[in-house]
Image: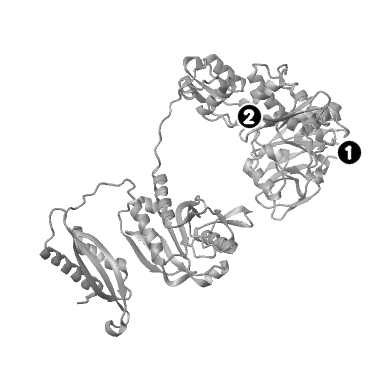
Amino acid sequence: MLVSWNWLSRYVDLSMDREELEQRLSLSGLNHEGTETSDQNPSLAPGDVCIDLEVTSNRGDCLGHIGVAREIAVLYDQTLKTPTPQLRPGTTTAQSLLSVENRFPEACPRYTARVIQGVTIGPSPDWMIEALQAVFWKRRRDGKIEPYQPINNVVDATNYVLMECGQPLHAFDLAKVEGQQIIVRPAEAEEIITAIDHRQYELDRSMCVIADAKRAQAVAGVMGGADSEVTDSTRDVVIESAIFTPLSVRRTARALKLHSPSSYRFERRVDPVGIDWASQRVCELIVESAGGTVAEGVLDTAPEIERPEPIVLRLSQLERILGISISPQEVDRILTALGCESDGKIKAGSGSFVAPSWRHDLTREADLVEEVARVHGYDQIPEDSPIPVTPSSKRTFDTATEKVRGVLTAAGLSEAMTPSVVTKKLDASLSPWTDRPALSTQTAMLKGAKKLRRTLLPSLIQARADNWAAASIEANLFELAHLYLPGKTAEDLPEELYAVGMVTGADFFAVKGMVESLCRSLGTAAALTVKQTDADGFVAGQLVQLSLGDARLGYLGVVSPKTLKQWKLPSPVVVAELSLPQLLSDAQLVPQQTIVSTFPTVQRDLNFIVAESVRWNELESVVRSAVGDRLKEVTYLETYRDPDKDGQDRKRVLLSVQLQRDDATLSGEEADSLVQNVIGDCKRKLNAELLG
């Protein structure tokens, strides 16, 4: 924000030292970026100074000279001199000359219009040009100053009020407004508008336009149109002063790559009450320099302005947070000088304040504490002032993700961070675990990406492919991030699901071991089971659904070579995706004490002949249920196939069973009995034969 010293002096006494003022503004939140004098910058009038202040995004009220003057007045306990517009309306009413209809209140909560008849377009007064040239100059790459070029006494007046109070305005030539109608509406698909920079822009339905009965005349909050701009032949003008929502303006400005001082301010929100003041102020200035008569009345689509809720401030909280005591009188002075309405009860230890309309960032007690602190002076807080600190504990989620990262990095995987928005092609490259369609963003991001991802795997495979293409690196990656799924109905908000994705060139069973290690590290109680399934993009028979008990955990599979060709990746690539909430729902993150038996174990090796379709987890489950709490461990040893001896679709599975008691030595008879239980259950449930 460029501020002219001469311009600023119209609203507040600037008898203080300039460098001291710049320092105090910096300490109060308006960081001083630099200062230029008239000797350094030819755009400045002799003796003037241009101060560059950094205004944070929550302080849109300081994007005008009056807002900065208000800060100075509070810091130095001075009176703010705000102009009071004086209008002398004619006998003709604005309603008889123009109509306004708002069809897009989501993007334009309030739209006002005034009409000035009989203006004479000409040059602006010298004092106005001098003020505008002090703040609208640009420095080119070669270091030379590009000065502000005055336009005319109407347009320059709108620019002057913009820099005076921070409210963007626009002037239309009433004669060029078809049907004497102003309609705030969404743009039509592929609608074309020629802006006042004389370039054409293609619009879409997400954008808000100011139109007449025939066509769009301005891109709302961004830039006016050339078809209705004020020229030398203009006699009647329409003054627009409105509120456009930050999201709508930001989205439009980005999509069109068309940013302006107006869009910059609308993106940071404007004063809902101040739009009428700005409208009256610019009409006053136009009449002074261009003549004409202001039509009686104003066209306002939302004259009722919601009053902010009172905020309670407790002196005890202020002292607790800042560590110093500030008198109730000083607290009341600071906040009322900033524009807050006080109930006068702060002297009793607690009072309520209503934030001014231009301070949308003041919504809670902590905000008022911050305002008092910055104006009173952070330098007034002693360095050794004790500030109580309350220790915080980690969330369960944070503890779990630390454990996940520890296990996967120990397994040789590197953590990746990939965009949440993907291209349509990438979204369709692997079958997601849902049949719900991907959500689309309003504007394309990252080289045409518009789809919110439903699975982490394509993005991780793309990252592996980029590493392979760049340096032949076989990147083994994992990521913890959100997936986005549409709600079950159109009105529902999207579901955000946290997932763990893995992409590696390791063996299928090695990746399964990583998943098992994750479950053990998180202390999951339910057993991990697998169930074969199929999906496009995976090797047939090598994709399984992982479950914890009866709850689905995720998927593990080998990507088919045909699918990998689109990424130009060599085989094999094994992927896994797990639901982090499901892992957490069954996790026990705090290790629990368990009894370690001091008695010896008894080991038995069993060699079963089973059907090819029997999986290890089924066999393991039967063994565990047959032995019960006497089972110390069951270990897979080997699989062997001999069709000539055992028959087609049969295999031998060799396993080891360790048996143990916690209270006594397990006898041979007990061990033999437990082994017979295993053999019997495997025979009955899996048709397994023990190989002698």
Residue 233 at x, y percent in the picture: 89, 39
Tell me where residue 578 sits by quadrant.
Answer: bottom left
Say whether residue 105 is left or right of residue 553.
right
Q: Which residue is mark 2?
A: 358
User: Crowding near pointer 2: few (<14 within 10 Å), some, many (20+)?
Assistant: some
Which element type, helix, strand or loop, lies under badge 1? loop
Q: Coloured how?
A: one colour
Residue 56 visible here: yes
- Judging depth in this view, the residue of 84 and 35 nearest the camera is 35
Residue nearest the viewer, comparing 392 with 606: 606
Amino acid under label 1? Answer: Asp
Q: Tell me the element at label 2.
A: loop
Image quadrant occupied by the C terminus? bottom left
Relative to 665, does residue 110 appear above or below in the rendering? above
Q: Is residue 265 left or right of residue 565?
A: right
Residue 440 rendering spot, x and y as whole percentages:
58, 55
Q: Quadrant of residue 654?
A: bottom left
The residue where tag 1 is placed is 232
Vertical position of residue 127 compared to residue 645: above or below: above
Q: Residue 559 placed where, x, y %?
A: 48, 68
**Which one is nearer the viewer's eye here, 605 or 253?**
605
The image shows residue 579 at horizontal and vertical percentages of 42, 55
Residue positioned 56% across, 16% down in the render: 330
Residue 44, label in figure? none
Relative to 482, is 317 above or below? above
